[in-house]
Image (cartoon, helix red, strand yellow):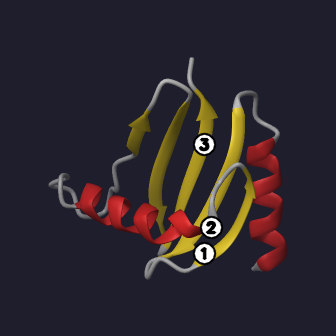
Amino acid sequence: MEESLDKQLDDTMNVHGVVGVLAADHQGLCLASKGNAQVSGAGLMSSLAEAGKQLSSDEQKCPVVCLESDTCNILIKSHDNVTMAIYKVAS
């Protein structure tokens, strides 16, 4: 799993505008991070993804949570007990 996850993070980092990426398990443990993503934020990212699930009536679909600031947008989504946070330059 480590090689597959690492490849996914590398591929995501190569997308235009992405400056960081973080993967965490459903308990908030950081599995991996690259770029500007802070390891200390893994628990918060998992919590926000779980809160986002409560907003959807369809339990099978998890919405994308987007945090916006003047300099950066963070897109957060859970899938198969892994939460991904993608840090992008604000457009």
The answer for how far apart the CA atoms under marks 2 and 3 are is 13 Å
Q: Nearer the viewer, residue 5 or 29?
A: 29
Q: Quadrant of residue 29?
A: bottom right
Mark 2 or mark 3: which comes first in sequence?
Answer: 2
Query: What amino acid does circle 3 point to?
Result: Tyr
Helix, strand or loop at mark 1? strand
Name the residue: 55% across, 58% down.
84
For label 3, the residue is 87
* Viewer-side residue, 87 vs 52: 87
Seen in the picture, residue 27 relative to 11 is either above or below; the reply is below
What residue would you read off at disc 2?
39
Crowding at label 2, few (<14), some or many (≥20) Cα neighbours within 10 Å? some
Among numbered discs 1 and 2, the one appearing first in the sequence? 1
The residue positioned 57% from the left and 17% from the top of the image is 91
Q: Which mark is residue 30?
A: 1
Q: Is residue 80 visible?
A: no
